[in-house]
Amino acid sequence: MGCRCGIGAAPVAATFDPVGGPSRARSRRATARDGVVVSYGFSFAAGSGRSRTRALGRMFAAIARAELTPGPRLVLHTVESAVGKDPARFRTDVEALVGQLSSGAITPEVTTLPLAQAAEAHRLLESRQVTGKIVLLP
């Protein structure tokens, strides 16, 4: 997930971008030209100081630019649309994902912190010092 686009890093076949905006552009640069970027989050628009309408407009403009720019294919995914379109397929996809997690075929990056360190978790997120997800434990 996300972009590990260091100098000389080999492009990857697929990138999953949970942020959107500038992050999606970095994800596309880190992905092979014949690869795919799955954009499933749009948190870049949250807290941007713009109205929701304006933030959505920027998001759609960025998606249109990505579609018109040569490079990896862009796929947009939201849980709501996936469940609404085909609930049985969504269930099958989730089961396949859980199977891959169980078998160790994929290993998400997760940082755990005690709930008492919630402020530290926010600091890490805001300063982009953590890769993957943070889970707070009771």
Image (spheres, rainbow, N blue to C red):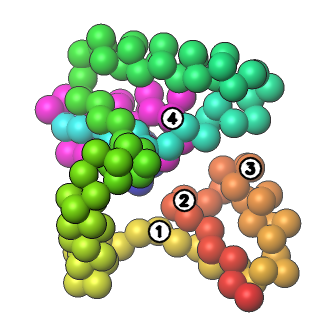
Total label count? Answer: 4
Answer with mark 1 or mark 2, whichever residue precedes in sequence.
Answer: 1
**Number of the label disc, if any, that sits on residue 98:** none
| Residue under numbered circle 2 | 131
Mark 3–mark 2 Cα distance, whole angstroms, equals 12 Å
| Residue under numbered circle 1 | 109
Q: Is residue 19 magenta?
A: yes
Q: Secondary structure at mark 3?
A: helix
Q: Position of residue 112 (x, y in %)?
A: 63, 78
- Magenta-tinted stretch: 12-34
Type of amino acid under label 4: Gly
Label 2: how many Cα within 10 Å (few below 14, some 14–19, many 20+): some
Is the Cβ of the residue at disc 2 closer than 8 Å to that at disc 4? no
Q: Nearer the viewer, residue 138 or 9?
A: 138
Q: Quadrant of residue 114?
A: bottom right
Is the Cβ of the residue at disc 1 closer than 8 Å to that at disc 2? yes
Q: Secondary structure at mark 1?
A: loop
Mark 1–mark 2 Cα distance, whole angstroms, equals 7 Å
Q: Position of residue 129 (x, y in %)?
A: 66, 56
Q: Quadrant of residue 107?
A: bottom left
| Residue under numbered circle 4 | 20
Answer with mark 3 or mark 4, whichever residue precedes in sequence.
Answer: 4
Label 1: how many Cα within 10 Å (few below 14, some 14–19, many 20+): few
Mark 2–mark 4 Cα distance, whole angstroms, equals 15 Å
